[in-house]
Amino acid sequence: MDATEAGDGGPVTHVVIAGGGSAGWMTAAALCSVLAGRGVRVTLIESEQIGTVGVGEATLPHLRYFNQRLGIDEPEFMRATGATYKLGIEFAHWGRRGDAYIHPFGEFGSDVDGVGFHHAFLRAQAAGSPHALGEYSLPVFMAAAGRFAFPAADPTDLAATYSYAYHVDSALYARYLRGFSEARGVQRQEGRIVGVDQAPESGFIRAVTLESGHRIEGDLFIDCSGFRGLLIEQTLHAGYEHWKHWLPCDRAIAIPCEGVPDPPPYTQARAERAGWRWRIPLQHRIGNGHVYASDFCSDDEALDVLRAALPGRAMAEPNLLRFQTGRRRLSWSHNCVAIGLSAGFLEPLESTGLHLIQLAIMKLVELFPGRAMEPRLRDEFNRVMQMEVERVKDFLITHYHVTERDDSPFWDHCRTLALPDSLQHKLETFRETGHVVRYREGLFLEPSWIAVLLGQRLLPRRIDPRIQRYPLASLQAGLEALRVRIRDCAEAMPRHQQALDRVGDPGDQGWRSASMSLYGVREAVH
Ligand SMILES: Cc1cc2nc3c(=O)[nH]c(=O)nc-3n(C[C@H](O)[C@H](O)[C@H](O)COP(=O)(O)OP(=O)(O)OC[C@H]3O[C@@H](n4cnc5c(N)ncnc54)[C@H](O)[C@@H]3O)c2cc1C
């Protein structure tokens, strides 16, 4: 009897990855380097005929750790993917038309006698301070001023209060990782999977068959086939939890256009009548997209909005994408693990797509099973992935729900929708007390919530009484001194373009070694 059918022991010796988008190649690259020397063979099957989703350009700082773990050289990666630096996301017109704030990869001020900085900020505001929250955050100031420098290594340094990510060309990133993986022994198989052979008793996948008739057997199958979920859904019927009632956007149109010199070191997310638009600067072009809810906006209207707002000449035809926000009920079922869009999708507002892929890969490596697919490992993987995705979901809903906008049926819908209990509790607690309910696990930490909640005008009814007792004059003097330090520090930094020019010069080794030693150790990642 087949070992996988019997569910008996023995190590996994052959991993088969179905799909070669960002998810497939990130998985292949990680497995071939992390599992090197453990006798595990990796095969990746992809179909050029089917292609990839072709978007996914804004990232989170965690991607740097992923690359570092694989031993990828940062300047080489940036040149290969046309990457720029990213310090956060600017949200325009979300709380109210005309508003704008930046959600940075970093902190706002620092605690005052153990009380969160935003309480001090709110007290100063109530006393008439004209300064915005972002003026107390170095990465916000840097972003607004178009500056970029690496975080400082000394955790006591003001310049250690932020982190950074990248804007990347995701197709080029996948191509780069393909070269990386093939050089380390990953076998790439071109072809369309047309058949899946399952063990009759256990339902475990034994092999996939390509259009050519070629049969590929494996012990562990990674479904990176995108929205279709070829193995996890079409074969194993893991189920899908739909979240459209919370996250109503279900379509996107993307058009790349010509770039501009000195691009901003941040992603732009501008709220529209029935969704929002992204603008993502790369070295060689700008990625533009319009995410919208088809219940409130036609495709033609969405395309008109996007075209009218292109900052340069279009470089390709519009790419229309349909998606269903939600999550796969089981990311790991039988001997199949879904990674990437096959595991679910939460729309791109906070650039979490590649992050969730990276998280799933690292979890899989940590819980790497034997051929028996130990249920405890599987259950733990599914628990962690569900929790992570649910946290992101709550944060995304917040952007739509915490708004005063009432200028379209879409915003009326978002403003009044019934929230998940976890988020209801979080928002009510903040509204009543100014405190952010902390999660023990999960992606977005307090500064991220503060950025969005205050940025979208959710002002608490009261603030921490300990700050109310603090002498106002010394509080104001402290805030002003911090604001000036932040401004001076940001203004002394190079422009983003200067930092990019140095990446483009492979001979500039002085910069390269400096950049490696200047990685911040604090890495306030939110
Ligand atoms: C509108 C939009 C914007 C996004 N923006 C961001 C962003 O800014 N930042 C971010 O981090 N993420 C973003 N994402 C998410 C990101 O694009 C994806 O998470 C990422 O690209 C991974 O996709 P994938 O590899 O899972 O799927 P895909 O790119 O769809 O790849 C699927 C692969 O499976 C192969 N395949 C499918 N069926 C078969 C078959 N039968 N036989 C053989 N091969 C097959 C295909 O050929 C392809 O290689 C965005 C997503 C969308 C929809």
Image (cartoon, rainbow, N blue to C red):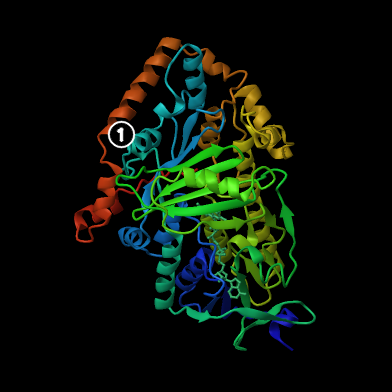
Q: Position of residue 98 (x, y in %)?
A: 50, 28
Task: Name the one closer to the observer, 297 or 54.
Answer: 297
In the rendered structure, the answer to whether residue 27 lies left or right of residue 154 reads: right
* Residue beneath the point at 39% across and 59% down: 68
Is residue 509 visible in the rendered image? The answer is yes
Task: Name the one closer to the observer, 241 or 272.
Answer: 272
The single residue placed furthest to the right in the displayed view is 201
Q: Ligand 1 quadrant?
A: bottom right
Q: Amino acid at mark 1?
A: Ala
* Residue beneath the point at 36% across and 39% down: 160
Task: Name the one closer to the observer, 22 or 290.
Answer: 290
Is residue 114 visible in the rendered image? The answer is no
Quadrant housing the N terminus:
bottom right
Judge whether 272 appears above or below 303 on screen.
Answer: above
Task: Name the one closer to the observer, 467 or 235.
Answer: 235
Q: Quadrant of residue 434?
A: top right
In the rendered structure, the answer to whether residue 64 lies left or right of residue 19 reads: left
Q: Residues within 10 Å of mark 1 (few under 14, many from 20)?
A: many
The mark total stands at 1
Query: Label 1, on which residue?
Result: 490
* Residue beneath the point at 23% across and 52% down: 511
Q: Position of residue 117 (x, y in %)?
A: 48, 26
